[in-house]
Every structure is written in structure tokens, then in C-alpha cells.
């Protein structure tokens, strides 16, 4: 039986793991992937101690630091089910194993929102991508569309113009939502075309994406746009569905936590972007992870 | 000592893709020889990767002709008989 199981592999998880190990809490960390959303960040310039670092590099630094500590780690493993036995026992099913623990910290972060239109699922990885940082080079001299006109969308477009011959930005509202500075930068690039007040309604293709259909809000006026790539920048959702029946969520499906990172179940804690805290930042998630581990330490002391 | 099986391994990735970096680091740590192909620079190899894997995401690993999409550590471990 573990004292603590941490679920997730982003900054909240890593920081919780380091703090728990230093408190000599018997800890297991289970994660499918390392880094979470930060691994997709082209550049991070607001994490103290690192003036400018790629997401991938910072993730490696984090995991390297974590692994210097004494705790058990299972990666490439997905948590399928969490069962509460009592206030001092939880059972966690991951892969073909079951693990018992007194407490757990959920740090499963957020996942990219999917495109909920016909073709949106089928063409994922076949022209539809969530990660320009990863896949942009595969769209050399191709026509692509970015869905979403906020900061993430314009950032994605800036990565794509390095490779693509034409980049459309599709925004549902009447104007771009991104910071002015970013908008100015984008508007100077000739191969970028901004389309506002349009909504994507279908993705077309055979084996791969060949185009998209968009609506301007008026029925019967749908138009087709030939593109080979569609990059999604339509935000993210809390990765909380596996635990939704166990702990209280808010309307955005984020796990509700109190100032001690405790959820509606006293022995289940949560930290980082999966929770209802006000800002989602790497530094904040890391801080919350540390705080959660220290509060788990206090909780375990009271159990004895 | 048992003789280790030689595998023919190709990794298709881009410079900036985080899981490509993680995957390459993993193979390097295990001292597994592999060819790393940057499909951002080598467009022909990019086409080859898309044909082989039927999709357009990186990384893709080709182990003796078997195609793995993404950094699927358990599948890679299984094919290369890596034990923890």
C-alpha cells in the first residue's frame, strides 16, 4: 500500500513528486506522458531561471530532476479507474494492475478540444493536428487552415508560415481575439488570410484532408475551402472525465479544490490545470503541486 | 552473454516535436542504434513516412518494417524486447 499516488506527468505532478519524496512519503507516480501541455510549447519565457527554453527541454529538465528523488514511477501507463474504499484507502486501476494507496493527487491537466463536426474525428492525424510545433514541417508548400483566432491560433499560424504556402485563420466571432501585438505581426504576412465570422462545419477528404466546409451563419451559403491541413487552436478542456463520478467538478468540468488542494473527497487531492484555480500557468501548476504534496503530508500525519 | 538481435530502426520526426525528442532520448539511453530522419528537412522522407503510416503526425517509428505511430513506449519495448 502506498501513502500517495500521483496521477499525471505535467508540472503539478513533477513538483508534487519531488516534494512528496523529500517528505519521505511512500509515493507512486503514474502517467501516460510527460510534460502535458507544456511539451507542446514552442518557447517558454516566463518560468524563472529559464530566460527562454523550449517546452520539450523544460519537460526533460523536470523529469530529470524528479528521477533524482526516491519514488516509484510508472510511465506510459493510463489510469482507467479510481475507487474509494474508505477515507484512508483508494484503489487505482492502471493497465492490468491495481494499486492501493491512502491518498492521491490528481494532476491530469487539460487536453486539446476536439473538432466536433463531421470528419473532425476521422481525419485527426490525417491532416488535422493539434500541434503545429510537431507537425508543421510536414505541410511544406501546402495550404492550411488554423481554427481559432485567439493567441494560440495566431501563434500556430506564425509557426505554419515557415512551411505552408498559404495559411487561413478562421475565427467564429467578428474579430480576432489575440493580443494586438500578435495581430499586427500576423497582418503583415502576405500569405496569411484572416476570415472572421465563419464557423467550420465539415472536414472533407479521402485518405487525407482535402478541404473544409465553412458557414458564415446564413443557411444555404456554406462554402468549401481547399486545404490539406487543419490546425486546431480552439482551447482545451479539463482532463477530468475519469474521475467525474468521484469528486465535485465545476461547470467547466474542472475539479473543485479548496485552499489545501483537497477535493470533495478528503483523501483525494488535485493540483494544476485540471482544477478550478484562476490561472493556468506552468509556474502556478508547479506551485500547486508542491502545495498539494505538503497538504497530503499533513493529512497522512493526522491518519496515524 | 547472449547475442543481441540487430534491428533495423528508423525514427521519423521533426526538430521541434517534443515526443520525437523524448523518443530519441529513450533509444539513446538504451543504447539502441537507430536512424533519425528529420522530415522537416527531408521532404522525400516525409512523404515516405506518410505513405508508410497512413497519417501525418510525428513521431513515427519503423522497426523491421513494423510501423508505430507516436511514442508508444510499451509497443517499442515489446518489439525490441526491452525490459525495465
Image (cartoon, coloured by chain):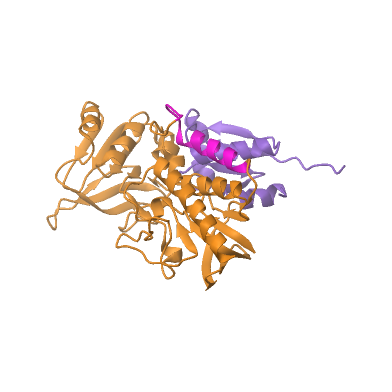
Q: Is residue A248 in sight in this rendering?
A: yes
Residue A29, position as x, y percentages in the image = 58, 53
Q: From this viewpoint, is residue A164 visible?
A: no
- For the residue pair A146 and A82, the one nearer the viewer reads as A82
Q: Nearer the viewer, residue A190 or A295?
A: A295
Q: Quadrant of residue A6?
A: bottom right
Frontmost residue, A288 versus B34: A288
Q: Residue at x 66, y 35 (%)?
A: B28
Q: Which chain is orange?
A: A
**Quadrant location, the N terminus of chain A:** bottom right
Span colored in magenta: A49-67
Instruction: Left or right? Give the position of A119 relative to B34.
Output: left
Q: Quadrant of the C terminus of chain A?
A: bottom right
How far from the left and from the top, in percent, is residue A292?
Answer: 47, 53
Point 20% across, 48% down: residue: A172
Residue A133: image location, x then y, percent: 42, 37
Q: Is residue B60 left or right of residue A211?
A: right
Tell me what residue is drawn at x 38 percent, y 55 percent: A259
User: Which of A10/A294 is in front?
Assistant: A294
Measuring from the top left, give residue A8's x and y in whole percent.
51, 53
Residue at coordinates 46% horizontally, 36% vertically from top-left? A55
Amino acid at each position: 500500500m502506498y501513502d500517495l499516488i500521483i496521477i499525471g506527468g505535467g508540472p503539478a505532478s513533477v513538483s508534487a513528486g519531488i516534494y512528496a519524496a523529500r517528505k519521505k512519503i511512500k509515493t507512486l507516480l503514474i502517467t501516460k506522458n510527460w510534460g502535458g501541455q507544456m511539451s507542446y510549447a514552442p518557447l517558454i519565457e516566463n518560468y524563472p531561471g529559464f530566460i527562454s527554453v523550449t517546452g520539450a527541454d523544460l519537460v526533460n529538465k523536470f523529469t530529470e530532476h524528479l528521477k533524482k528523488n526516491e519514488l516509484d514511477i510508472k510511465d506510459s501507463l493510463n489510469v482507467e479507474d479510481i475507487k474509494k474504499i474508505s477515507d484512508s484507502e483508494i484503489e487505482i486501476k492502471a493497465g492490468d494492475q491495481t494499486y492501493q494507496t491512502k491518498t492521491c493527487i490528481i494532476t491530469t491537466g487539460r487536453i486539446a478540444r476536439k473538432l466536433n463536426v463531421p470528419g473532425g474525428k476521422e481525419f485527426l492525424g490525417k491532416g488535422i493536428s493539434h500541434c503545429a510545433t510537431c507537425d508543421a514541417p510536414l505541410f511544406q508548400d501546402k495550404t492550411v487552415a488554423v481554427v481559432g483566432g485567439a493567441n494560440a491560433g495566431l501563434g500556430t499560424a506564425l509557426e505554419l508560415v515557415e512551411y505552408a504556402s498559404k495559411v487561413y485563420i478562421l475565427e467564429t466571432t467578428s474579430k480576432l481575439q489575440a493580443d494586438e501585438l500578435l495581430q499586427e505581426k500576423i497582418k503583415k504576412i502576405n500569405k496569411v488570410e484572416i476570415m472572421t465570422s465563419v464557423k467550420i462545419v465539415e472536414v472533407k477528404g479521402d485518405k487525407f484532408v482535402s478541404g473544409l466546409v465553412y458557414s458564415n451563419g446564413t443557411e444555404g451559403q456554406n462554402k468549401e475551402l481547399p486545404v490539406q491541413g487543419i490546425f486546431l487552436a480552439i482551447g482545451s478542456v479539463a482532463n477530468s472525465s475519469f474521475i467525474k463520478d468521484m469528486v465535485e467538478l465545476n461547470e467547466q468540468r474542472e475539479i473543485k479544490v479548496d485552499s489545501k488542494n483537497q477535493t470533495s473527497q478528503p483523501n483525494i487531492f488535485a493540483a494544476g490545470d485540471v482544477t478550478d484555480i484562476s490561472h493556468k500557468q506552468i509556474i502556478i501548476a508547479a506551485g500547486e503541486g508542491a502545495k498539494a504534496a505538503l497538504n497530503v503530508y499533513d493529512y497522512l500525519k493526522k491518519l496515524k | 552473454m547472449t547475442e543481441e538481435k540487430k534491428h533495423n530502426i528508423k525514427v521519423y520526426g521533426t526538430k521541434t516535436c517534443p515526443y520525437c525528442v523524448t523518443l530519441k532520448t529513450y533509444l539513446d539511453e538504451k543504447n539502441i542504434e537507430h536512424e533519425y530522419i528529420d522530415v522537416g528537412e527531408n521532404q522525400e522522407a516525409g512523404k515516405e513516412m506518410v505513405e508508410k503510416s497512413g497519417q501525418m503526425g510525428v513521431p513515427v517509428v519503423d522497426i523491421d518494417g513494423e510501423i508505430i505511430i507516436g511514442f508508444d513506449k510499451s509497443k517499442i519495448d515489446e518489439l525490441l524486447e526491452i525490459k525495465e
